[in-house]
């Protein structure tokens, strides 16, 4: 996995060297999950930060790729898992809260359409993304008969896999995203968007959960700056 991450970073640096425009962006995520295994999932805030590379084809159209660090996930509360909330304390209905916050290196590749407006441009972008999970935690708090239990797991650890065989995470994700925004004459830009995962990210033991189905869903708000003129 470390080799894969290194190759992604090396590839992106090579792309940067040929780019005609580049910039930086950062913003907030409103993240959750969807799919059969997402029952009870509630949105949580996250973030994204990284670089932007743009290859203008003509004045109105360009190809843009990004290299982002992006935190996603969801939280759950007050739900009784049919498999028991904590394997070693599985003796009754309990109140619980837990949150999963996977951290990804993400590479969106977008077709970008530009429309002159006022002193800047309206920008519409759509395209696929590819991501690799590089970290994140599950934080769990359960209360049963007045007794509180708190645990924390690294999401991609062997401990997580052993403790939650019906619900843990694959590191590879992909999907499609879109955003709309405005780029000012000063080259400051802002946009709102969404990314919808198309890959199941639940790395469940199929002997326990035979049809795992969990995907990322994120709304984004970003601001940024592009350094070079088209």
Image: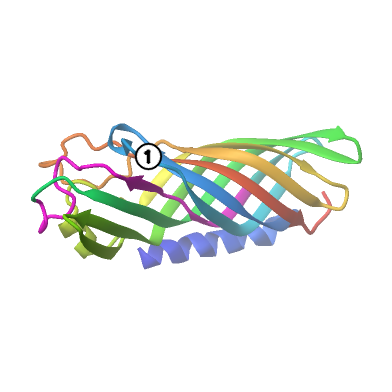
Q: Residue at x 38, y 67 (%)?
A: 2
Residue appearing at x 51%, y 44% in the figure: 129
Q: Is residue 22 above or below residue 93?
A: below
Identify the element where label 1 is drawn: strand
Stretch of the chain drawn in magenta: 65-90
Q: Is residue 70 magenta?
A: yes
**Residue 66 percent location from the top left of the image:** 60, 52
Viewer-side residue, 8 vs 48: 48
Residue at far front of view:
146
Q: In front: 61, or 225?
A: 225
Count the numbered circles shown.
Answer: 1
Position of 37 with respect to 178 (left or right) is left
Q: Is residue 169 above or below residue 6?
A: above
Percent across and percent down for residue 150 are 26, 64
Q: Residue at x 25, y 47 (%)?
A: 203
Q: What residue appears at the point 39 percent right and 40 percent down from the top-left corner? A: 33
Q: Is residue 15 visible?
A: no
Q: Is residue 80 left or right of residue 77?
A: left
Question: Which residue carries the number 1 mark?
Answer: 215
* In this view, 40 is above or below 94: above
- Residue placed furthest toward the right: 119
The answer to which quarter of the image holds residue 102 is bottom left
Question: As displayed, is residue 171 above or below residue 127?
Answer: below
- Which quadrant is home to the N terminus? bottom left
Closer to the camera in the image, 130 or 59 = 130
Residue 174, position as x, y percentages in the image = 43, 43
């Amino acid at each position: 996995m470390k080799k894969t991450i290194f190759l992604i970073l090396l590839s992106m640096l090579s792309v940067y060297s040929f780019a005609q425009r580049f910039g930086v962006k950062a913003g907030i995520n409103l993240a959750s999950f969807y799919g059969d295994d997402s029952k009870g999932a509630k949105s949580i805030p996250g973030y994204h930060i990284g670089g932007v590379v743009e290859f203008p084809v003509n004045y109105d159209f360009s190809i843009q790729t990004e290299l982002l660090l992006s935190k996603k996930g969801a939280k759950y509360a007050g739900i009784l898992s049919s498999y028991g909330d904590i394997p070693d304390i599985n003796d009754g209905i309990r109140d619980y809260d837990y949150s999963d916050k996977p951290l990804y290196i993400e590479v969106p590749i977008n077709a970008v359409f530009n429309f002159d407006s006022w002193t800047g441009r309206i920008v519409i972008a759509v395209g696929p993304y590819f991501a690799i999970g590089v970290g994140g935690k599950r934080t769990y708090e359960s209360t049963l008969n007045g007794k509180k239990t708190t645990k924390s797991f690294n999401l991609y650890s062997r401990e997580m896999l052993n403790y939650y065989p019906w619900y843990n995470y694959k590191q590879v994700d992909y999907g499609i995203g879109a955003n709309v925004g405005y780029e000012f004459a000063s080259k400051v830009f802002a946009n709102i968007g969404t990314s919808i995962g198309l890959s199941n990210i639940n790395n469940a033991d199929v002997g326990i959960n035979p049809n795992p189905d969990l995907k990322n869903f994120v709304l984004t708000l970003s601001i940024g700056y592009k350094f070079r003129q088209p």
